[in-house]
């Protein structure tokens, strides 16, 4: 583990470690003191992570870092002078001397041991008959000797590599990939070796064990319930409810009726059409009617609509609204931009729309929501209670939960509970939750168990109106003559409903979709209900008090059960599972995540550019107006989180409207990123001039229409160099293959300093058999600074030393197809089918079927055994009965059948020094499996993408299934909102469609030896239908409505690209007890792989070709390496009084990820440590000072504690924390 004479200590983030390629000019680090060698081996962790306890010293050369041995010793001790580089002969001499010294020590040790054995006096005395103790001592020494030889062999080989590499550097030659004797490509050793140092304390979290188990664990509830769907009488999905008339004699029943109007920001109509047709009238009537009687109450949740209305009303009306909020008549619930979908939405966007709504409320009305209200999302995630709790809300309400769970919770009086996160050891995440018991949130299903009676108390349905009661008994206006009878009938329903709860306080919602849009409805509901309330309140013998109330009224002093888990998947009746919408309209689900990644990148880069410009006094020349573009993008991304938008469950015209908004913001965000990058890379900031008509940088790609796939920019080469600026949106440095399209095969890529960079030239393919003329892809291996900008140069050069060409094999499988090749890139055409074949890099080998071109197995480096990981495409049909699959529901006609295209695929195999790939062209799907030949994260997983086009399918759903020999039994794991992992069990007692779950970011299966994770760049539905399987639904085309109100099928399919990473990990220390717990975490490698997939590097060519651009310098914003379990979720400038401009403050949102150390962590290829959650924010941003630091609630509504002078913070694992900061 550790080098002889080198002990180790816990890693701390290194101050100012070198970033970018070494130029050989950096200063030497000061010497570090030597430390004694402790007895015993160097401490380590089962994960393979090394815990260093003191800086490395060379025992022969004396104290101080082992200069020049960074390459050899870095994996052994991270402190081995990472930033130490010497140039030329001096370095080579030091390497040779130190190498020789270590070799001498090894040989001398060997000599001493053998000498000791030979001259052992006891040996001669016993005449050669060793006592047992002596034999065991000798055996131990031989073993130690073998170990010592092995370690020295390893060190010598490291030294040899380092010498070769440093020799190449010293002679000024680029270190380039080369072919090995067996024909595979070999990359040079990493010039900046990587390490991962995990503190043992940081591994304890995933092991859990602290805190009490919850009373209600949803995995256990699922196992317990029969799901038998018995007829419950008037409450069809429940049971008959009875009560004794005197039950409320000692403690009267308190009933709070909560009038509400559920406004979808887009569904059957677009957002704007709903606003003009209905929402503005609801809100205008609200102001008028609420002022008529101070006893009236109303709640509102969607700030997207409210803010649009606010912009169009008078100052007088605004003052009236503030009065209504101030006196408690109008309550703002949740207060997000929308009521988000909780299945497909990513936690970045969930938080962002919540901040957008809360900031709007604080600025315009001065109100802070206290209760969550989610009556319509199709199933509920446990991420939402966490976010609401961290936003300082005290309670929440949910509605769409599986009818069998509602019945069970009603029978056990557990419809109100404290919702706790699975990892929480101390109840700090507990939030009160009220679950509505019945079928819907409309009036017939909210007053009590009998919808026939409740419908009679929906006074919008009075005879003569446009809607009536399906149960054929209409409401009757309340008069003095009938009030006693009508009130008793309603009270009976209230009492029955209250029997399902533990407290004597009852919540009764009164509303539906787009209700209260006419003054007549306000009068009908409020006047008739007030007569009932007055009557009931005047009868002491009834022991009831009724009034219009607030949403959080039921939070009393009861002792509630504690629940953990989530409420997916949702069924509203029979076997109608709402699992189709996990995939519906995947094109827009993918566009959502592209916009999200751009928004985060634009926010961070804009904040940094503005802080640097202000510090330099150049903010007068900086385009502050870009803030309005950021604000608009936040709102468009927020709007799309609505539970009929990202879900894919809106009308076709509404989906187009969302798409136009998303694309508009994506285009604007590229502008924001370009403007910030322009300022930050200029060597001389005084030359900065913002010209909106002629941007300094071009975009990496563009989309002609809202339903187009991106078209990549082609860089035109000529005699003068073309410059590229590459943005890395990750908070960790990354070594990535950066692809660029160019118009010539004669290209060289240089670093900013003029050093050649390894690159691979490939053809650009327009179809299975045609290359695009005069367009080539050059893929560059570049080290990108954390959150930074790297400058690269492209030269047109006929001496393209350093650019290595890909080789291509094209298998036509007997099909008579013409092939259009390019001269510059060799293509070998094989008319017949290929044999099975493999691709490999230094980390893994992937083998493929020659016939299908699809993945068959993966073998990790250093392991004998191949892991079967075979992929196949499958097709689900839909039922022939009246109920068929639609936008919401997945109702398959049985198990999936193999996908059977009419022609065999064309298979194209590309091999090269930086990446190799297999592309299989089928009729409806083109799949690419790419293996990066790169040290570290990029090379440890397979990059998989599927370009899907099923526009000629009828009632079919296309699935991708991976089958392995992992013994996962009935257990698999899916993420919730990219934030946490939820274990799942395949339930045989439930139909196939019930076993699908949302997968916004990842899903995995595992056994005691292995874990296979499928990372995704877009939300899709996933399941594991038998042991060792993972399958994902890629797209669905359905010709009919599924009777949930949409009135359309899904027929507007697009060509859609679904992107994945497939990661196979070895489990070093698994145990059954641990695996049986209802909690799981990804490894650090898995987290970082997900980040690489979801936050791609952005390539921006300098637009002007002539004259030569001003001097450009790479931008490295961070002065220290962030701990690798920290994620900068956002750095978001806050708005000034003029909401189109930024203030001096920003919100810094950090997330400390929970991770599992039991997955082996060898050769991970990223430089980072963990720090027990500690981070020094004061020195984080290079060249900027942290003016102030105020911890706040998640959405900045509440300061937490006092502003202190200390800028050191600490986060617990899984914690998301927001800080109000000033940078400058």
Image (cartoon, rainbow, N blue to C red):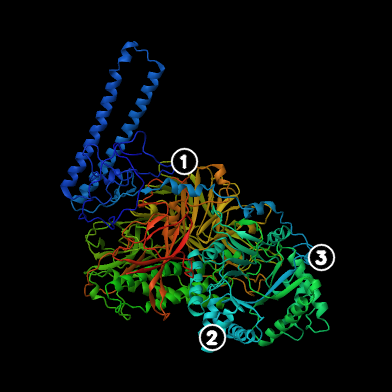
Q: Looking at this view, is 1087 or 197 the one in front?
A: 197
Q: Which residue is mark 2?
A: 319
Comes first in the chain, label 1 or label 2: 2
Circle 3 sits in a helix, a strand or a loop, which is it? helix
131, 698: nearer the viewer = 131
Residue bearing mark 3: 246
Q: Are marks 1 and 2 in contact (CB under 8 Å)?
A: no
Q: Nearer the viewer, residue 521 or 252?
A: 252
Calculate the distance from the C-alpha at mark 3 to the C-alpha at mark 1.
72 Å
Q: Quadrant of residue 444?
A: bottom right
Label 1 or label 2, whichever lies nearer to me, is 2
Mark 1, residue position: 865
Residue 601: x, y in percent? 39, 67
Disc 1 to disc 2, how far (Cα)? Answer: 73 Å
First in sequence: mark 3 vs mark 1:
3
Q: Is residue 254 above or below residue 965?
A: below
Of labels 3 and 2, the one closer to you: 3
The image quarter containing residue 799 is bottom left
Secondary structure type for disc 2: helix
């Amino acid at each position: 583990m550790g080098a002889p004479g080198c002990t180790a200590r816990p890693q701390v983030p290194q101050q100012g470690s070198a970033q970018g390629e070494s130029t050989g000019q950096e200063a030497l680090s000061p010497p570090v003191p030597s430390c004694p060698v402790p007895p015993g081996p160097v401490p380590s962790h089962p994960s393979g992570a090394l815990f260093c306890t003191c800086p490395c010293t060379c025992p022969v050369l004396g104290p101080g870092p082992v200069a020049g041995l960074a390459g050899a010793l870095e994996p052994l001790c991270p402190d081995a002078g990472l930033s130490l580089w010497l140039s030329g002969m001096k370095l080579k001499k030091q390497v040779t001397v130190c190498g020789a010294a270590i070799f001498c020590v090894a040989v001398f040790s060997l000599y001493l041991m053998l000498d000791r054995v030979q001259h052992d006096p006891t040996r001669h005395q016993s005449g050669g008959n060793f006592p047992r103790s002596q034999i065991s001592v000798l055996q131990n020494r031989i073993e130690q000797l073998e170990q010592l030889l092995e370690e020295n062999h390893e060190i010598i080989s490291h030294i040899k590599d380092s010498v070769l590499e440093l020799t190449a550097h010293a002679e000024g030659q680029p270190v380039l990939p080369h072919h090995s004797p067996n024909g595979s490509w070999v990359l040079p050793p990493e010039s900046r070796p990587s390490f991962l140092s995990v503190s043992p304390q940081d591994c304890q979290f995933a092991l859990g064990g602290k805190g009490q188990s919850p009373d209600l664990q949803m995995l256990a509830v699922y196992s317990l319930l029969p799901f038998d769907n018995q007829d419950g009488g008037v409450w069809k999905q429940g049971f008959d409810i009875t009560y004794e008339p005197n039950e409320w004699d000692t403690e009267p029943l308190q009933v709070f009726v909560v009038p509400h109007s559920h406004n979808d920001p887009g569904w059957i109509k677009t957002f704007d059409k709903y606003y003009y047709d209905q929402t503005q009238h609801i809100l205008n009537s609200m102001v008028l009617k609420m002022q008529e009687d101070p006893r009236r109450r109303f709640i509102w949740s969607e700030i997207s609509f409210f803010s649009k209305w606010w912009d169009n009303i008078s100052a007088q009306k605004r003052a009236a609204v503030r009065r209504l909020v101030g006196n408690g008549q109008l309550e703002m619930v949740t207060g997000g931009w929308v009521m988000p979908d909780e299945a497909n939405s990513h936690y970045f966007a969930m938080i962002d729309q919540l901040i957008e709504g809360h900031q709007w409320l604080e600025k315009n009305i001065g109100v802070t929501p206290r209760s969550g209200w989610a009556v319509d999302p199709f199933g509920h995630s446990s991420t939402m209670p966490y976010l609401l709790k961290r936003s300082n809300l005290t309670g929440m309400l949910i509605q769409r939960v599986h009818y069998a769970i509602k019945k069970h919770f009603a029978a056990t009086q557990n419809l109100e509970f404290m919702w706790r996160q699975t990892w929480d050891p101390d109840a700090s995440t507990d939030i009160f939750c009220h679950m509505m018991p019945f079928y819907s949130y409309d009036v017939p299903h909210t007053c009590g168990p009998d919808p026939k009676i409740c419908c009679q108390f929906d006074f919008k349905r009075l005879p003569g109106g446009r809607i009536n009661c399906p149960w054929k008994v209409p409401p009757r206006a309340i008069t003095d003559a009938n009030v006693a009878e009508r009130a008793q009938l309603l009270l009976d329903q209230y009492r029955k409903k209250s029997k399902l709860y533990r407290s004597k306080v009852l919540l009764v919602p009164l509303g539906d979709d787009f209700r209260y849009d006419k003054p007549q409805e306000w009068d009908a509901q409020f006047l008739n209900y007030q007569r009932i309330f007055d009557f009931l309140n005047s009868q002491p013998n009834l022991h009831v008090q009724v009034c219009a109330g607030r949403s959080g009224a039921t939070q009393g002093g009861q002792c509630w059960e504690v629940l953990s888990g989530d409420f997916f998947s949702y069924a509203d009746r029979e076997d109608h599972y709402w699992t189709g919408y996990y995939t519906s309209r995947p094109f827009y689900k993918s566009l959502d995540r592209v916009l999200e990644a751009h928004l985060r990148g634009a926010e961070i880069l804009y904040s940094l550019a503005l802080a640097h410009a202000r510090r330099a006094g150049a903010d007068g020349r900086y385009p502050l107006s870009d803030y309005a573009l950021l604000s608009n993008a936040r709102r468009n991304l927020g709007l799309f989180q609505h539970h009929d938008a990202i879900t894919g469950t809106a009308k076709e015209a509404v989906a187009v409207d969302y798409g136009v908004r998303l694309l508009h913001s994506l285009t604007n965000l590229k502008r924001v990123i370009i403007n910030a990058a322009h300022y930050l890379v200029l060597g001389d900031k005084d030359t900065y001039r913002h010209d909106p008509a002629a941007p300094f940088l071009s975009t990496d790609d563009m989309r002609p229409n809202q339903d187009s796939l991106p078209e990549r920019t082609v860089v035109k080469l000529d005699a003068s160099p073309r410059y590229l600026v590459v943005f890395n949106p990750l908070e960790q440095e990354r070594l990535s293959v950066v692809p660029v399209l160019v118009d010539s095969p004669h290209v060289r890529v240089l670093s900013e300093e003029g050093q050649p960079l390894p690159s691979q030239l490939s053809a650009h393919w327009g179809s299975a058999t045609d290359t695009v003329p005069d367009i080539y892809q050059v893929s560059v291996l570049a080290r990108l600074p954390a959150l930074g900008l790297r400058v690269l140069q492209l030269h047109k050069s006929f001496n393209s030393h350093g650019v290595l060409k890909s080789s291509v094999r094209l298998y036509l499988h007997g099909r008579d197809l013409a092939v259009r090749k390019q001269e510059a890139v060799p293509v070998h055409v094989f008319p017949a089918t290929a044999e099975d074949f493999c691709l490999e890099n230094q980390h893994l080998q992937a083998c493929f079927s020659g016939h299908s071109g699809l993945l068959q197995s993966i073998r990790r480096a250093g392991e004998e055994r191949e892991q079967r990981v075979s992929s196949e495409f499958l097709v689900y049909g839909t039922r022939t009965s009246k109920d068929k699959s639609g936008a919401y529901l997945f109702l398959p006609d049985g198990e999936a059948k193999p996908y059977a295209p009419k022609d065999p695929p064309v298979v194209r195999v590309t091999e090269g020094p930086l990446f190799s790939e297999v592309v299989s062209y089928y009729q409806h799907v083109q799949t690419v499996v790419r293996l990066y030949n790169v040290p570290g994260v990029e090379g440890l997983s397979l990059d998989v993408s599927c370009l899907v086009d099923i526009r000629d399918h009828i009632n079919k759903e296309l699935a991708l299934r991976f089958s392995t020999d992992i013994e996962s039994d009935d257990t698999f794991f899916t993420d919730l909102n990219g934030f946490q992992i939820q274990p799942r069990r395949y339930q045989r007692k439930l139909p196939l469609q019930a076993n699908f779950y949302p997968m916004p970011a990842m899903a995995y299966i595992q056994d005691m030896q292995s874990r296979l994770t499928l990372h995704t760049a877009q939300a899709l539905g996933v399941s594991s239908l038998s042991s060792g399987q993972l399958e994902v639904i890629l797209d669905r085309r359905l010709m009919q409505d599924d009777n949930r109100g949409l009135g359309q099928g899904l027929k507007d399919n697009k060509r859609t690209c679904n992107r994945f990473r497939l990661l196979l990990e070895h489990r070093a220390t698994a145990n059954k007890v641990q695996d049986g717990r209802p909690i799981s975490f990804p490894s650090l490698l898995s987290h970082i792989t997900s980040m690489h997939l979801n936050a791609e590097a952005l390539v921006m060519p300098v637009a002007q070709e002539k004259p030569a651009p001003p001097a450009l310098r790479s931008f490295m914003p961070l002065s220290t390496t962030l701990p690798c379990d920290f994620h900068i979720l956002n750095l978001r400038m806050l708005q000034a009084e003029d909401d189109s401009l930024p203030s001096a403050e920003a919100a810094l949102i950090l997330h400390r990820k929970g991770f599992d150390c039991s997955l082996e962590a060898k050769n991970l290829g990223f430089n980072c440590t963990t720090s027990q959650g500690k981070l020094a924010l004061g020195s984080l941003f290079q060249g900027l000072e942290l003016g102030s630091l105020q911890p706040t609630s998640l959405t900045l509504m509440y300061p937490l504690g006092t502003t202190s002078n200390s800028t050191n913070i600490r986060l617990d694992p899984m914690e998301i924390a927001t800080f109000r900061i000033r940078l400058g």
